[in-house]
Image: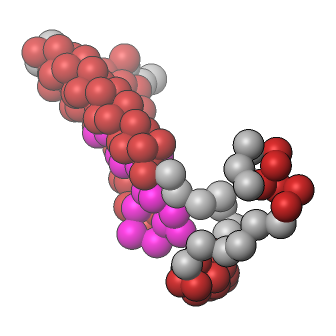
Amino acid sequence: MMGPLVIVSAAANLALVVLALAFLVVTWRVLAGPTLADRVLALDMLVAIAIGFIAVIAVKTGFTLYVDIAISLGLVGFLATVAFARFILSRGTPAPGAGEAALAGAGAASGKAAKAGKGGKKKQSGKQAKGRGEK
């Protein structure tokens, strides 16, 4: 018959293996994420996985101070995620899937507008000038 300590030890070992696999997958997402938002989300998941590691180690060792460390890491991770989200919003990134083609098109359009504006002030038709009180 298996005692409770054996069951807890086996469950902790299994949890460590699952967390290690999750850590590898999420690390791949941080490195290969196509957008900055994917990377930020993956970093948030890394914080959650680290909290999981700390919690499992706390259960295995019986050292309850690790739980306080995990809570502190959770608060810091939350604040970091909020800061990254505000950074992404302030950057004004293009919509997902826009890619380089949309950026190149926007650059070409602004180039055309700049060329059109080089000719100086264009002469207005009489109708437009009267609308603004000009002659």
Q: State whether residue 135 appears in this view.
A: yes
Q: Is 39 placed left or right of 110 in the picture?
A: left
Q: What stretch is highlighted in magenta?
A: 30-50
Residue found at the far right of this picture: 127
Q: Where does residue 45 sit, x and y in percent of width and height?
A: 42, 43
Horizontally, residue 34 falls left or right of residue 31, namely right
Question: Could you say where residue 21 lies in the image, as x and y percent from the top left?
Answer: 43, 56
Quadrant assignment, res 65: top left
What type of secondary structure mainly makes up the magenta span? Answer: helix
Q: In this view, does 21 lie to the left or right of 63?
A: right
Q: Nearer the viewer, residue 4 or 76?
A: 76
Asked where in the image residue 73 lies, by quadrant, the reply is: top left
The answer to whether 9 is drawn above or below residue 26 in the figure is: above
| Residue at 67% across, 74% down | 122
Q: Quadrant of residue 85?
A: top left
Q: Residue at x 38, y 31 (%)?
A: 82
In-front residue for pair 39/82: 82
107 w.r.t. 59: above or below: below
